[in-house]
Amino acid sequence: MRKFKTESKRILDLMINSIYTHKEIFLREILSNASDAIDKLYYKSLMENLSFTKDDFQIKIDIDKEKGILKVTDNGIGMTEKELEDNLGVIAKSGSYDFVKNLKEKKDIEIIGQFGVGFYSAFMVSDKVEVLTKAYGSGQAFLWTSKGAEGYEIKSAEKEQHGTDVIMYIKKSVEEENYEEFLSEYRIRELVKKYSDYIKYPIKMDVEKTKKDPEDEKKSIKYKEEETLNTMIPLWKRNKSEIKEEEYNNFYKETFFDFENPLKVIHTSVEGMSVDYNAILFIPSKAPFNYYTKNYEKGIRLYTKGILIMEKCAELLPDYFSFVKGMVDSELTLNISRETIQHNSQLKRIAKSIQKKIKSELLDMMQSDREKYEKFFNEFGLQLKYGMYENWGMNKDEVKDLILFYSLNEEKMISFKEYVEKMKDSQKYIYYAQGKSVDAIKLLPQVEKVREYGYDILCMTEEIDEFAIKVLNEYDKKEFRSVSSGDLGLDEKEKDIESKKDKEILKFIKDSLEDKVVKVRLSASLRTHPVCLASEGDVSIEMEKVFKAMPNSKGITAQKILEINPNHKIYEKIKKLYEEDKEELKDISQILLTQAMLIEGLPIENPAEYSDMVCKRL
């Protein structure tokens, strides 16, 4: 028994219990090593004009359920006894890494292994591991055997062809762990598809099938047939001009388990000094059922050299583009387990490039296919609005040009840019109104004066809208202004329409309403309605409603202003009551405030009291 040349037990324990988070990763590591071994022989054939082509190479998986053996065989370069000793006798020494480091030319070869620990992941699922190998050009094969950290043996053996067999004696299942799943054809096929589908050599396995018995059609005969389990060439590495739309659609639906075709496919390849990757990204037609919940997990599949590293790499997508699905393949510097990235700066550069590409494609869709873009926005626009608002508007400039709102003048969805392009020279602000629906907004009293000037109004019907607008504050140096604002900037004479007598009456009404409003004034904007509510300060009436629906809102309220139409007959009634019956005017003031609150959709404190006051005066 030979001893490992490092603190083997400690390293193996670390590897099995800490480095790899999922035991199923072992198959990815063994298949990656097999691919590396073939790459080495293929490179040797290029350098020495040997008679090999890529079609000569393959990886074979064999399962023996009765003996509990899983075997992975490659016909790559193989190892000599010294290489066995150097590569498998010293944990964390990578033959692949040394091989690449010593290459003078690295063209046409990609070596996956870097740290030399991936092979030992087999011990996570195996009681014993054997490596039967024969180096290319050698007449002698060798068998390496180990049961773990205690050590290993190397002895001469027989093997016809060059290459390596990794023979794993799978552990018996225990209550906590099902090891025997790795002796299932279905499970092995699943793991190859998940992690190693794009290894560029065929991974083959004899698969059990059934067919009708030719002598008795009622019976079936089981037989074995060799199948290639991996597709080998990733779709994202193929030339876009050679890929049909149907191929993209089928790939998306099969990969992400969607029943509908993607709304948009983004196939891109970037090569440069700072960033280098291939990617295929998809924008779904429908938001997943759990998209706007805490259970939804964003992320793009991350590959390096065709090997899946992360199922969902969240770092590649900002939250406001979390709806994007897809995969990115890049030559990354990995950590020792190959499950995370060694240097985050690489990911950041790729993420920034992807973010820029997604935004560019969405803007192009908005211009060239508006119907499709509006379909997209109907599904994911809410997420873009959250992106504009979150983190105190840190990403607002990245998102603002992708946002749409319904225009009262245009009677369709428009962008901020489209609104500003049609603003009149006399218009100071981008006007908006908040409400439950477009129809409800059209009926708001505050809308009348703005529309009288011919100015457009953007309709905001979702709770997040006004919060996002408050963070954005302006677009193209044009400030946003709510139609419920105390100052609409429409007529400078608004401040001078109250006479001394009017001020007395309005003060009386304000005093009778106590702290329910901060001000009562005559309105220059109302046309047909008797009253409305306006607000001043940072919290609008619509924002107050949102806060009230939240737990622990701590009584956040808007500073409300009751506006009265001086040209409405109700104001004639008010002036008369002020002279003749001030107690009655107090009740009328309460009724008018309640009506204004109902128009705004605000809850009233005492509906029964309001009903009694109205019925009394009918």
Image: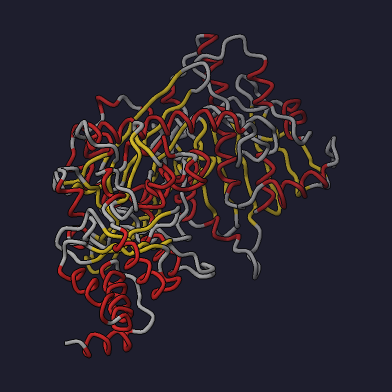
- Quadrant location of residue 89? top right
Q: Measuring from the top left, give residue 335's x and y in whole percent.
A: 66, 36
Which residue is found at the position 39% from the left and 62% from the top? 519
- Image position of 543 (left or right of 96): left
Q: Nearer the viewer, residue 239 or 282?
A: 282
- Image position of 581 (left or right of 26): left
Q: Nearer the viewer, residue 459 or 78?
A: 459
Q: Is residue 567 above or below residue 82?
A: below
Quadrant in which the C terminus is drawn: bottom left
Which residue is found at the position 70% from the left and 29% from the top? 94
Q: From where the camera sits, is residue 27 visible?
A: yes
- Quadrant location of residue 11? top right
Quadrant in which the N terminus is drawn: top right
Q: Nearer the viewer, residue 354 or 173?
A: 354
Which residue is found at the position 48% from the left and 48% from the top? 390
* Number of numbered discs: 0
- Image position of 382 (left or right of 298): left
Q: Is residue 253 above or below residue 358?
A: below
Q: Measuring from the top left, give residue 512's x and y in whole percent.
A: 39, 75
Q: Measuring from the top left, give residue 119's x and y in whole percent.
A: 66, 39
Q: Nearer the viewer, residue 318 or 455?
A: 455
Q: From where the camera sits, is residue 291 visible?
A: no
Which residue is found at the position 26% from the left and 61% from the top? 213
Q: Measuring from the top left, give residue 2's x and y in whole percent.
A: 85, 39
Name the colouring of the figure.
Answer: secondary structure
Q: Is residue 223 above or below residue 50?
A: below
